[in-house]
Image (tube, grey):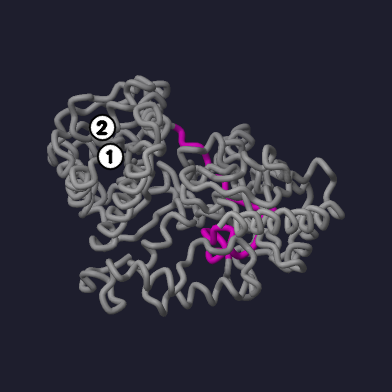
Amino acid sequence: MEALAQSATEGRAERQREVVQALMATLPPHCLLYRDEDTAPYECDGLSVYRQLPLAVALPETEAQVQRVVQICRRIGVPVVPRGAGTGLSGGATPIGHGIVLSLARFTKIVDVDPYARTATVQPGVRNLAVSEAAAPYGLYYAPDPSSQIACTIGGNVSENSGGVHCLKYGLTVHNVLRVRAVTMDGEIVEFGSLAPDAPGLDLLAVMIGSEGMFAIVTEVTVKLIPKPQTAQVVLASFDDVVKGGEAVAAIIAAGIIPAGLEMMDKPATRAVESFVGAGYDLDAAAILLCESDGTPEEVAEEIVRMTAVLREHGATRLQISRTEAERLKFWSGRKNAFPAAGRVSPDYYCMDGTVPRRTIGMLLARIETMESKYGLRCMNVFHAGDGNMHPLILFNGNDPDELRRAEAFGADILEACVELGGTVTGEHGVGIEKLNSMCVQFSEAERAAFFAVKRAFDPAELLNPTKGIPTRARCAEYGKLHVRGGLLPHPDLPRF
């Protein structure tokens, strides 16, 4: 065993020397990292329970350098993992041990803000919030706002099709991007979408968005900007039962109201958040809803009246309406800081990302409560209630192998419950490496074969972020011994998204 380990180590070192030498021929010294102490910060993304050192990290500064890097890697057969800010939560940017990481962190230029066309063209390393800051002087902003918007980048948003608390009314990344420029694994520059109302040829923009870095490497993005609303107010509603809160969410949408934001948090989440940021939440409530209305003062006033009526009718025990912009931001600060708040009450947390029909939110929360007893772990629930995108935060200690095992099983159980209830295994965090097994539960072998066919159309050599997103037949066969019967989903009669 020792001899095998020694041989593997020597083989890796030899391969690393070959790769580094090849990349040194095209990249300046400050654009290439290969010592362990230098590549360690890139060993994982936000899914930190899985770590792997790459052979090297390339930090190109120009599109031409990106082209040359991928051409070299294609020629010598080295996998490439694109990386943005590393805030992803599904392991999409986890390195491949025998590959390199290609970081777009130095692509930070805002190329153009056009207030007349209401667009912004930016490089992939531009932070999400920076786009809105650049558009603010024109009374415009970029709508998708993930909780990590102060750090996450547009390139990563495109790769994961990120959402945020305002995606119910304004849409996900896919609804707010007009054009993507990218480099394929062959080094070819391609463009998806157009600044015009339509583009010639096949419309592949939606295929590219959410492709998790498996199809091409994003080098430039044009996004839509929208006018900043004249005013906005938030209704903070308390419920003595989480099922009532879930029913209220469905009732608001059924009443024809589309809030700018509709978020829900359970008691463990609100208590963790309140001690962290002091958002003014009701600590006695079993669940709280944050319902935001934006638009003209008249539109907001009318919508607030309609929303409060629905909330009262469905059992709200307490209603607070923001009176100032500062108070509105204070209410939202709790929801935006739910993840760091979880980090204060637990050594580690495992953030899930399943989606269910709104009418089943209460059912899923009840199941999660039962699972807490089954796995002996606590769970905080925060989620985009308006579109049923759930973010259970499983609390555990990563230094305890048994707790880690139970946390993973707990997460898989939640995702399978989402599928059983007619939902999906991911809403906005992507599949990465985290949800590969769960993909086996939701999609048939024929569907997975179709996914691989699209992947190979973009990347025939399968060197661009391999082993992510799409599970192999062997993986699903092994996982299916416990979960899939005859290749069929459990409860096949239920409608799926």
Residue 222 included in the magenta stretch of the image: yes
Occupied quadrant, residue 491: bottom left
Callout 2, which amino acid?
Pro
Left or right: where does residue 190 sit relative to residue 252? right
Q: Earlier in the sequence, mark 2 or mark 1?
A: 2
Distance Cα–Cα, label 2 vs label 1? 8 Å
Left or right: where does residue 416 sit relative to residue 165? left
Which element is circle 2 on?
Answer: helix
Left or right: where does residue 413 sit relative to residue 33? left
Q: What residue does disc 1 label?
A: 379
Occupied quadrant, residue 111: top right
Query: Which disc number belongs to residue 144?
Result: none
Residue drawn at the location 23% of the way across and 40% of the way down:
306
Q: Residue 303 at what x, y percent from top left?
A: 29, 39
Residue drawn at the location 59% of the way across and 43% of the way down:
153
Q: State which mark lies toward you, 2 or 1.
A: 1
Residue drawn at the location 85% of the way across and 46% of the way down:
28
Residue 461 included in the magenta stretch of the image: no
Range shown magenta: 205-230
Q: Residue 172 at what x, y percent from top left?
A: 46, 52
Q: Is residue 251 visible?
A: no
Callout 1, which amino acid?
Cys
Which element is circle 1 on?
Answer: strand
Check whether the beta carbons of the residues at disc 2 and disc 1 lie within 8 A of each other.
yes
Q: What residue does disc 2 label?
A: 268
- 10 Å crowding of disc 1: few (<14), some (14-19), many (20+): many
- 10 Å crowding of disc 2: few (<14), some (14-19), many (20+): some
